[in-house]
Amino acid sequence: MKGRKRHVLVDTQGWLWGLEVTPANVQDKVGARRLAAQVAPLAPRLAHVWADGGFGGEALAAEYATYGWTLEIVQPTAAARGFAVLPKRWIVERTFGWCVQQRRLRIDYEERPEVAATFVYLALIALMTRRLVHVSTS
């Protein structure tokens, strides 16, 4: 498989709720549908989802509404020129940044998306464990 996309659903703290790894030729909306079906039974209190422009569209918003979720597409402001951090979107980008700190995830070594997803889970489990334990060095 040449290239892949990682679709993640995280809370506002960056904790992972769901992950879907797809080939790069799969549209974002398809990955979002698969991710929603995966996460919906695990997050009954989820009410609002922020996404970027690739996830826009009435069909996806209607499908998310069947889970009781509202979908808000984060768009750059008209005044933004050049690079601008979009509100709420940086949360997912921060999670991807945490993943890339793991050497194995910097380059796409895996042939199967299931294996790639497993390494993302392992990287984020290690990160969450370190944060929850917060071992003091003194």
Image (cartoon, rainbow, N blue to C red):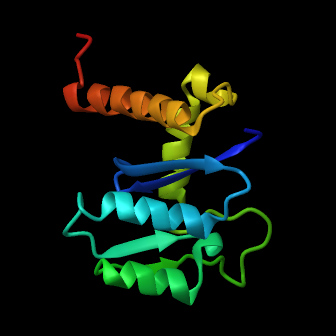
Could you tell me residue 31's position as x and y percent?
Answer: 55, 61
Q: Is residue 17 visible?
A: yes
Q: Is residue 88 visible?
A: no
Query: Residue shown at 34%/31% (left/top)?
Result: 125
Which one is in front, 71 or 97?
Answer: 71
The quadrant of the rendering that contains the N terminus is top right
The quadrant of the rendering that contains the C terminus is top left
Query: Residue shown at 59%/22% (left/top)?
Result: 104
Query: Residue shown at 74%/56% (left/top)?
Result: 25
- Above or below residue 65? Residue 27 is above
Could you tell me residue 81's position as x and y percent?
Answer: 78, 72
Could you tell me residue 8's position as x and y percent?
Answer: 47, 53
- Above or below residue 78? Residue 48 is above
Quarter of the figure with residue 37 = bottom left
Quarter of the figure with residue 78 = bottom right
Relative to 67, is 76 on the left or the right?
right
Query: Residue shown at 36%/57% (left/top)?
Result: 38
- Above or below residue 6? Residue 72 is below
Could you tell me residue 10's position as x and y percent?
Answer: 39, 55
Relative to 64, is 31 on the left or the right?
right
Which one is in front, 9 or 24?
Answer: 24
Relative to 50, is 136 on the left or the right?
left
Quarter of the figure with residue 12 = bottom left
